[in-house]
Amino acid sequence: MNSPNQGEIEFNAYTYDRRQYMFGLIGHSTSFEAARRKASDLGFDHIAGGDLDVWCSAPPQLVENVEVTSATGKTISGAYIDSCFVPEMLSRFKTARRKVLNAMELAQKKGINITALGGFTSIIFENFNLLQHQHVRSTTLEWERFTTGNTHTAWVISRQVENNAPLLGIDLSKAKVAVVGATGDIGSAVCRWLSNRTGVAELLLVARQQQPLKDLQSELGGGRILTLEEALPEAEVVVWVASMPRTLEIDSATLRKPCLMIDGGYPKNLDAKVACEGVHVLKGGIVEFGSDIGWTMMEIAEMEKPQRQMFACFAEAMLLEFEQCHTNFSWGRNNITLEKMDFIGAASVRHGFSTLNLQGQPQAVVV
Amino acid sequence: MPTPVSPEVAVLDERDASAEQLPDFTTEAYKDAYSRINAIVIEGEQEAYDNYMALGTLIPENKDELAKLAKMEMKHMKGFTSCGRNLGVTADMPFAKEFFGPLHQNFQKALKEDKVVTCLLIQALLIEAFAISAYHIYIPVADPFARKITEGVVKDEYLHLNYGELWLKNNFEASKEELFAANKENLPLIRSMLDQVASDAATLHMEKEDLIEDFLIGYQEALSEIGFNMREIARMAAAAL
């Protein structure tokens, strides 16, 4: 076996394969170029040098093992699986589908109790209706081993609104909060939370499809349905839980000042679009752990503090493992209840996670 | 994760329905491609029969077990022969013999030199992983008759892969260097066989990309089971790409 050099990932997969993985994270690089760089760093030279076709045929890899100790003192171990998917494959329907299913199969075969579907993984799962593809070769996927992590993401984004609006002098009880992507799994949960728990003055509901918007409005018993162009100039807080079209241009001059923008979409690209004095962009759905985690994989997600920060959806898998809650906690669309958000939120605080806040200093969340 | 609205994500909504459809098994183009694919499968099973019988001479203590595995391969061969007959296709056996030629030669050479490790890598790992991946991809797009037969076959092939894995795992340290060398020599042959068959496979609605990835998953899994670490597996897989 090779001895890892200092600062290098422990490659002794054989040994690790024989220990119990308790939580798993399925992720991917943010671009093809980033993926090639990472593969080269990891010693996967045959893939690093390959073109996109080679990557389309590359199997998923369990690339990192990690141990995490909760604020309560409990330690769990987990594994990071790179699906070898890159966003450049989005237009290849079958490839994207295969990447997700193969990564899930690998997680299950490794015996991981609960695995979060990160980045585009859960989007592909839902949009391609992968529930229809439970059989992968000789493996029948056990859905209860997976979670989208959306409940924790929705809770974190909601708390980010509550924590950060006052820092900018925005009084939520008088403010209009626009939710862009309001009818999605996370969007609808954020709307539910803001409407029931924070008493925002008015919710502005923005999404592509009209009927789901009307259904949501009726469920919430309020909220105004608007187009993006109508909503932006009215809102003091904008929660983006939809990926931004590359071509979308936002005229910062029309925005309210101050304005809090929570970028909860994937990938996170709002910052570049609305850079302007008085408009404060916060990366949404990101949490910070109370101590360093000895992993390198959050570097590929371009986290500011990759040793501590991560997507809330990943943290959900850890929380479910800490809580011994082995179930597909976040699954399907519009199943996120306030009770589930309460449960995962309380676990998040208990085990030492805090939400990312504006001044770069995370604040312990008081539930 | 969020509901996507961006154009690059919106394409996710447009399902590629054509890729999910079954091919028309009655067209000349299908039958022509099938004549070669079917021949490869028949020849592959025949090779497997011969190879397991030959392995019995190298591992006399497992002779009976290997003969049992060989008999299964013979049964598979008969099953696949009936699949061709069912579609009214004559298997192109000369093509298949040539297709397996280089791998066949390497196996025979190793056999003569009593290189049991190389023989096991060729037959029990490479050929079995290749067969398992191809059968799994074939099953959803096969005609109903062939589908049933292939589903039965694929279960058996796992037993064969497991046999090779177990033997090599039990003799790992002594086999390691020979496995590196045998992999380097033979994995590129599998890759070139996949390339050769790609266009006929595509006619049967089996995509090359799927075949390669599924094969690599099975092969890497076997290498990991035997005892190779991640870096060694990555280095070995490089020979395929």
Image (cartoon, coloured by chain):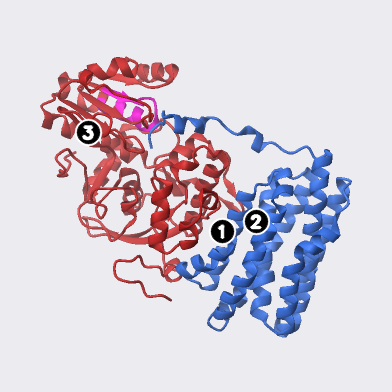
Q: Chain of mark 2?
A: B
* Colour seen for chain A: red
Q: Secondary structure at mark 2?
A: helix
Instruction: Verify whether residue A13 appears in magenta.
Output: no
> What whole-number distance in Å separates the C-alpha atoms at marks 1 and 3?
42 Å
Residue drawn at x 43%, y 44% is A328
| Magenta stretch bounds | A178-194
> What whole-number distance in Å separates the C-alpha atoms at marks 2 and 3?
47 Å
Among the two numbered marks 2 and 1 on one chain, the one whose residue lies closer to the N terminus: 2
- Residue tagged by mark 3? A281
- Residue tagged by mark 1? B217
Residue drawn at x 78%, y 49% is B146
Q: Secondary structure at mark 3?
A: strand
Label pair 2/1, CB-CB below 8 angstroms: yes
Neighbourhood count class around disc 1 (C-alpha, 10 Å): few under 14, some 14–19, many 20 upward: many
Neighbourhood count class around disc 2 (C-alpha, 10 Å): few under 14, some 14–19, many 20 upward: many
Q: Do discs 2 and 1 share a chain?
A: yes
Number of the front mark, 2 or 3: 3
